[in-house]
Amino acid sequence: GAGVSQSPSNKVTEKGKDVELRCDPISGHTALYWYRQSLGQGLEFLIYFQGNSAPDKSGLPSDRFSAERTGGSVSTLTIQRTQQEDSAVYLCASRLSLLGADTQYFGPGTRLTVL
Amino acid sequence: GESVGLHLPTLSVQEGDNSIINCAYSNSASDYFIWYKQESGKGPQFIIDIRSNMDKRQGQRVTVLLNKTVKHLSLQIAATQPGDSAVYFCAENSGDPPFGNEKLTFGTGTRLTIIP
């Protein structure tokens, strides 16, 4: 595709429910990133993938958060037993590779609201 | 801990004037910096980047200046237009070897408003 796409664009859920957020990176990009952006805040790094492996999961806020990537392309971020503090915009970015200084390109984000 | 921060949370500039957005960083090991622009309801958009072996880099209407001595980064936008109104973030690489620049640390952001 032309850019990074994410779905859904908006998700409203009830506290305690599980949610799954999807990211389709730019075709050919091997590195994929997930960030969280709370209202009026900067971006908080969650996790990144090189291919299908995630070398650094240190940014995940709790064990309720998990992510996977299959086929070196699509990635899903799963939040189990959602809490109100999980409400934020979840942004995905992809990058051609981890070598060199090529930049990350962001998708439009998924706005998650936990009631 | 290491952090990236911005001096001013908001900035209003008259259309046609130049604007300067500042950013302080504290990780002396960072060697790559990026400026992103984020419009309402959209993801961050790459504007310009600079490596630590440079002091200045110019793009179309934008210039990034890096002062490693005082760990300061700035974004200059010339002849501002209404479309420049957005939140601007600076980011620094904070990745660890062996991959290097794989993780970015973002500042809180500065909201730039262009006054017609």
Image (cartoon, coloured by chain):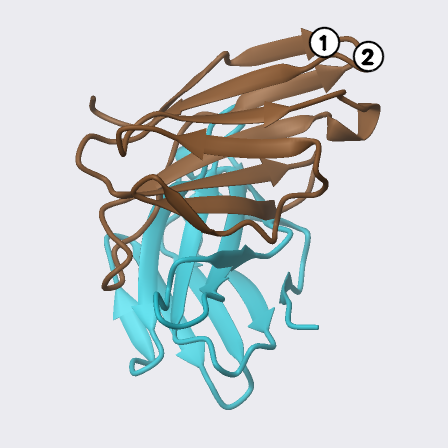
**Closer to the camera, B21 or A75?**
A75
**Quadrant location of residue B26?**
bottom right
Which chain does the brown colour mark?
Answer: A
| B98 displayed left or right of A112 | left
Against B100, is A106 above or below?
above
The amino acid sitting under disc 1 is Thr
| A75 displayed left or right of B14 | left
Is residue B109 in sight in this rendering? yes
Residues tagged 2 and 1 counted as in contact (Cβ below 8 A):
yes
* Residue A48 rendering spot, x and y as whole percentages: 44, 46
* Residue B20 rendering spot, x and y as whole percentages: 49, 61
Q: Residue at x 42, y 55 (%)?
A: B35
The amino acid sitting under disc 2 is Leu
Badge 1 density bin: few <14, some 14–19, many ≥20, Cα 10 Å: some
Q: Secondary structure at mark 1?
A: strand
| B14 displayed left or right of B80 | right
* Residue A59 rendering spot, x and y as whole percentages: 61, 50
Against A81, is B27 above or below?
below
Which chain does the cyan colour mark?
Answer: B
Tag 1 subunit: A
Q: Residue at x 80, y 15 (%)?
A: A16
Q: Residue at x 64, y 33 (%)?
A: A65
* Residue A46 rendering spot, x and y as whole percentages: 57, 44
Residue on which the image places disc 1: A13
Mark 2–mark 1 Cα distance, whole angstroms, equals 6 Å
Are discs 2 and 1 located on one and the same chain?
A: yes
Residue on which the image places disc 2: A115
**Closer to the camera, B72 or A104?**
A104
The quarter of the image holding the N terminus of chain B is bottom right
Badge 2 density bin: few <14, some 14–19, many ≥20, Cα 10 Å: few
**Quadrant location of residue A80?**
top right
Is residue B82 in sight in this rendering? no
